[in-house]
Image: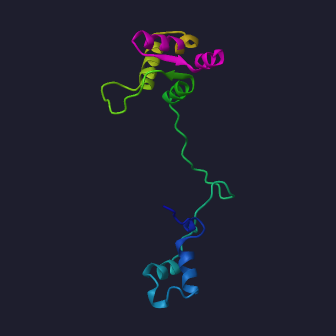
Amino acid sequence: MAQSRINKAASIFTRMNGLIKSNIIKENEVPLWFDIYKKFPPKRDPAYRSILGNDIVHDLPKKLFYEEDELRAFYFSNVTPIEPIVLNSNQRKPNWELFISTYKHLEASGVDRNELVDATIENLQAQGFFFKKKQEKQNLIEKQ
């Protein structure tokens, strides 16, 4: 559904003022708030401020990054689960959640950080999960 972006171009007061000046809205149909707004205008015009333009907003919230986000991004870019995903099953966690929880468990047990991903994949394969690194998949494709 298409929506108008006119509210980003001017405030409601400016738009209403334009409608009154062009006689689209008659003097007797002017909303009550318009006269009050005219007598007591705000200190700052409440028009939309662009972040990309000269009106830079300085109090933007910080982006949240969690350690799990980095692990999840690594998992989806470097690891290919071979087994199908059953979406309506609540019996077990998805493979990426198991990957993250196993990774954290092995990290807490003191596994070397360089070998942590390989140890996680080996641990999950020992539990019966099937994973391949995407690099191995590329090597298989190149050999064919």
Please name the predominant secondary structure of the magenta segment in the image: helix
Considering every residue shown, the one lying at the far front of the view is: 144
Q: How is the image coloured?
A: rainbow
On the image, which quarter does residue 14 sit in? Answer: bottom right
Q: In this rendering, is residue 89 above or below 106?
A: below
Residue 54 figure quarter: bottom right
Q: Residue at x 30, y 25 (%)?
A: 91
Lateral position of residue 134 relative to residue 84, left or right = right
Residue 95 in the image: state x and y as whole percent: 43, 23
Taking the spot 63% from the left edge, 54% from the top edge, the residue there is 51
Which one is in front, 51 or 95?
A: 95
Q: Residue 28's x, y, as percent?
A: 45, 90
Query: Residue at 47% across / 21% down in the picture?
Result: 82
Q: Is residue 139 above or below residue 35?
A: above
Magenta span: 118-144
Q: Quadrant of the C terminus?
A: top right
Pick the residue in front: 137 or 99: 137
Magenta-colored stretch includes residue 129: yes
